[in-house]
Amino acid sequence: MPTPPISDLSDRARDIFRLVVEGYIASGHPVGSKTLAGPGGVNLSPASIRSVLQELQDAGLLAAPHTSAGRMPTEVGLRLFVDGIMQVAEPSAAERAQIERGLAEGGSIEAALAAASSALSELSAGAGVVMVPRREQRLSQIAFVPLGPARALAVLVGEDGAVENRVIDLPAAVPPSALEEAGNYLTARLMGRTLGEAAALVRKEISSGRSALDAASADLVERGLAVWSVDAADRPVLVVRGQANLLDESALGDIERVRQLLDELENAQAIAGVLEAAREAQSTRIFIGSENRLFSLSGSSVVASPWRDADGRVVGVVGVIGPTRLNYARVVPIVDFTAQSLGKLIGQDGFSRK
């Protein structure tokens, strides 16, 4: 059903509709005419309120569950509320501080992503998600810096200037010349390539005897590739935190919906597809219930925003997944601020994978 324009509603219908939606979001329960006629409600008789509620229901904006005399917004109603009525405020100072504190304590990309998703979960009472796109960095340089007789620091530099460091163990009595030779050899072959492409080329050369490396340097090359190859396989594409938040008191009356949602949250690839739809958005996007195929069965909503690097390029997407009664007015600015904070952090010199 298409969403009717907000201008089609009379002032009193708009006021009653807003109160129903806000009451439902706050409590998770249908809102009745007695509640609407009470303190903080509208100055109308219960009979007049019931008449307006029926009009809103006939317009497809409200629904009346069989077990209750009250009304709750439909997905169409929620979309109208989000697009035409909802007033979004800036995150509070405490909310901004919580997000920034978590990111500052991360230290590495993985830790920062986990901190961001945890903060989103705690502040939204939903599941916080952060996605990093499935793509490999193209590389510029690799170097081995001696740390002592048995260890070296492998330094990997990307084309965008990003630096990643790993400590590797060295075999006994490796001369400094082997470190330099291994670094020069890898740099010449990985420049402009992804790690996977460079590794395939290097290993082919070494196995065929065409590398012109001595045994010590060849061993260092293998160690340098291995420390990133294992890491790349474990690199998280999607970080989800706070699934337990979805099991709140109001969810117990609809346990099948929650079970379906938890099953959906196990499908990382499908969730990444949902978040991918927000990558090209200029601002935070909201998907309500069946507007997204993945969460149509559980009737859940997604609030997502892309986060960008210093050059404005999209790095990933952050978001919140929860029931359709999410407090959108509060969640939207929190998600947007988290995306901005991640974007600032990714551009800082000290922010690197460890």
Image: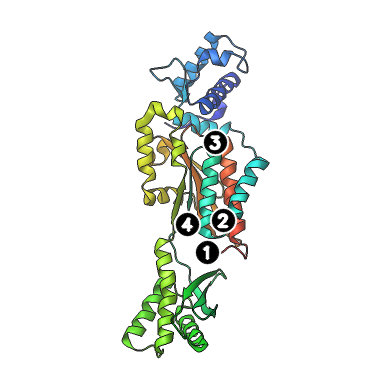
Describe residue 94's horizontal placement relative to residue 114 as left or right.
right
Q: How far apart are marks 1 and 3 (CA)?
A: 33 Å
Please report the residue visible at 58 percent of the width from the left and 48 percent of the height from the top.
338
Q: Where is residue 241 in the image (x, y as percent from the top left)?
A: 47, 46
Q: Mark 3 points at which residue?
A: 328
As helix, strand or loop, the secondary structure at mark 4 comes to loop
Q: Which of marks 2 and 3 is in front?
A: 2
Residue type at mark 1 is Arg
**Mark 4 crowdedness (10 Å alpha carbons): few <14, some 14-19, many ≥20:** many
Q: Residue 106 carries which label?
A: 2
Front residue (pair 346, 333): 346
Q: Which of marks 2 and 1 is nearer the N terminus?
A: 2
Q: Which of marks 4 and 3 is nearer the N terminus?
A: 4
Q: Do the residues labelled 4 and 3 touch (CB within 8 Å)?
A: no
Q: How far apart are marks 1 and 4 (CA)?
A: 13 Å
Q: Quadrant of residue 86?
A: top right
Q: How far apart are marks 2 and 1 (CA)?
A: 10 Å
Position of 96 relative to 251 (above/below): below
Q: In which quarter of the image is residue 236?
A: bottom left
Q: Where is residue 47 in the image (x, y as percent from the top left)?
A: 52, 8
As helix, strand or loop, the secondary structure at mark 3 comes to helix
As helix, strand or loop, the secondary structure at mark 2 comes to loop
Q: Mark 1 points at which residue?
A: 353
Q: Which of marks 1 and 4 is nearer the N terminus?
A: 4
Q: Where is residue 292 in the image (x, y as percent from the top left)?
A: 41, 41
Q: Which residue lies furthest to the left in this view?
A: 208
Q: Are marks 1 and 3 in contact (CB under 8 Å)?
A: no
Residue type at mark 4 is Val
Q: Which mark is residue 132?
A: 4
Q: Earlier in the sequence, mark 4 or mark 2?
A: 2
Q: Distance between the residues labelled 4 and 2?
A: 16 Å
